[in-house]
Structure formats: structure tokens, C-alpha cells
Amino acid sequence: EAGVAQSPRYKIIEKRQSVAFWCNPISGHATLYWYQQILGQGPKLLIQFQNNGVVDDSQLPKDRFSAERLKGVDSTLKIQPAKLEDSAVYLCASSWGGGTGADQPQHFGDGTRLSIL
Amino acid sequence: GENVEQHPSTLSVQEGDSAVIKCTYSDSASNYFPWYKQELGKGPQLIIDIRSNVGEKKDQRIAVTLNKTAKHFSLHITETQPEDSAVYFCAAPPWEGNKLTFGGGTRVLVKP
């Protein structure tokens, strides 16, 4: 089966600019996650969708970050305006969505590496 | 929320030797413990997971053990090979809520 697809792979912008990332999960996976991974750290969950509804966005900086999941399939994550501390890899993951959610294997894409100048 | 600590942060082993990485967690009701391998420029890849109703699980050269009383779980890699060199992450979910909390990662270097 095809894995989680993300684009772009790399993005360089200046602070205060805006940027958007795209994710296409594994076909049939109801749950989609966006993580932020700062260099040298483990991934940190930003937002979790179940189909097209938000399950958890408690760690999403809502003053600058937004995300949507169109028709319960693809998702976009946007940052506006970007800050220097947003430099990180943004990972998308998906799982089939049964059970409580967290106890289902999550499959990750290769991420978008964002550099803020 | 859940707190997951992972040790060591770096681990260097000779090819053929074993490697062990340990994680502790704080939420005694956690019931699912995955391990991920992340190679340079790639996303984390699930390599093994264990649920709270078993104490050990093996998959070829990889095994995970779980001690619920002590709230820790460990990854064991036997007969290490150069391709095992990567960063390994453990994770655990809180009983309430759906998100995984990841450990800080262990950079494993297998020297030929």
C-alpha cells in the first residue's frame, strides 16, 4: 500500500511570512495527525483529526497555526505569520482510527523540513 | 499528562553486540507502547509495539519488554548490524486522550 505522502519536502521562508504543508494519508485511514519535530527532540503532536473533525488541538498555537482536513482525506497545515522558533520538521501520520485512537499504529510520512530565516 | 523519559540519549555498540534502550512513563493506566526507528531525512517507522496485557514481544532481532509495576519498557536489539544505526523513539499514550507522548530519542551507532 502507498504510504503517507507529504509535500513539499523542504521550505525556506523569512520570518513573518506564511507557509502551508500538505498531507495525503494512507487510503482508508480515518485518523490523521500533525506533529512538530524540533531538531534533536521527539515528535510533538500539534493536532489530531478523526475523519474531518478535530479530536485534539490542545498543543496547536492557534494564534498562528491552522489546519483543516478536506472531506476527511487530505489535510493542510498553515503557519501565518512564521516565527524563528517554528523551524522544525512537520510530520504527518495516519492510523485506521479504531479503538481509542492512540493504541493504533501510526504511520508517518517523511515530513517537511521548514527553515525560517 | 503523560511524561516519557528515554535513556540513554546516545549508544555506540560494536557490530554483533546487543543494544538496550529503556523508557519510563508516568501514567499507570497507559496500555500501548510503540517503538519507532527514524533514519536521517525520513519519518519515524514503527518497528515493534506491545500492549499492556503481555510482558514481552519478539520480532526477529528486536524485542520489547514491559514492566507495568515499575512503569518502564525496553527495546532490545540483538546481533546489531550497521543498518541498525538510527534514532530510536519510544512513546506512550495517556489513559485519557488519544495522543502519543514521545521520548527524547536515542541515537544508536553500530560500528563495523
Image (cartoon, rainbow, N blue to C red):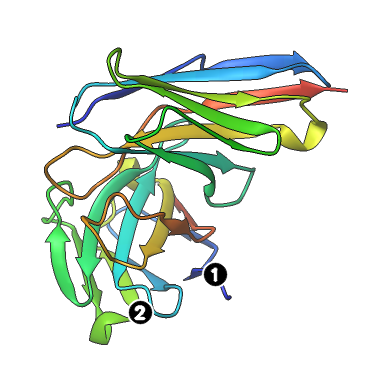
In this view, the mark in front (2 or 1):
1
- Residue B49 horizontal side relative to residue B107, left or right: left
- Which amino acid type is marked by label 2? Asp
Q: Chain of mark 2?
A: A
Q: Is residue A23 visible?
A: yes
- Residue A8 in percent (x, y) is at 51, 69
| Location of mark 2 (residue) | A74
Check disc 2 and report its element: helix, strand or loop: loop
Check disc 1 and report its element: helix, strand or loop: loop
Location of the C terminus of chain B (image quadrant): top right
Q: Nearer the viewer, residue A111 or A88?
A: A111
Q: Chain of mark 1?
A: A
Location of the N terminus of chain B (image quadrant): top left
- Residue A1 horizontal side relative to residue A44, left or right: right
Outermost residue toward the bottom in this view: A71
- Residue B40 in percent (x, y) is at 64, 43
Residue at x-position 42% and y-position 73%: A25
Q: Quadrant of residue B72?
A: top left
Badge 2 and badge 1 both on one subunit: yes
Residue at x-position 33% and y-position 81%: A73
- Sort mark 1 into few (<14), some (14-19) or many (20+) by Cα contacts within 10 Å: some
Residue at x-position 11% and y-position 55%: A63
Q: Nearer the viewer, residue A81 or B10?
A: B10
- Sort mark 2 into few (<14), some (14-19) or many (20+) by Cα contacts within 10 Å: some
- Which amino acid type is marked by label 1? Gly
| Location of mark 1 (residue) | A3
- Residue A102 horizontal side relative to residue B47, left or right: left
Residue at x-position 53% and y-position 20%: B21
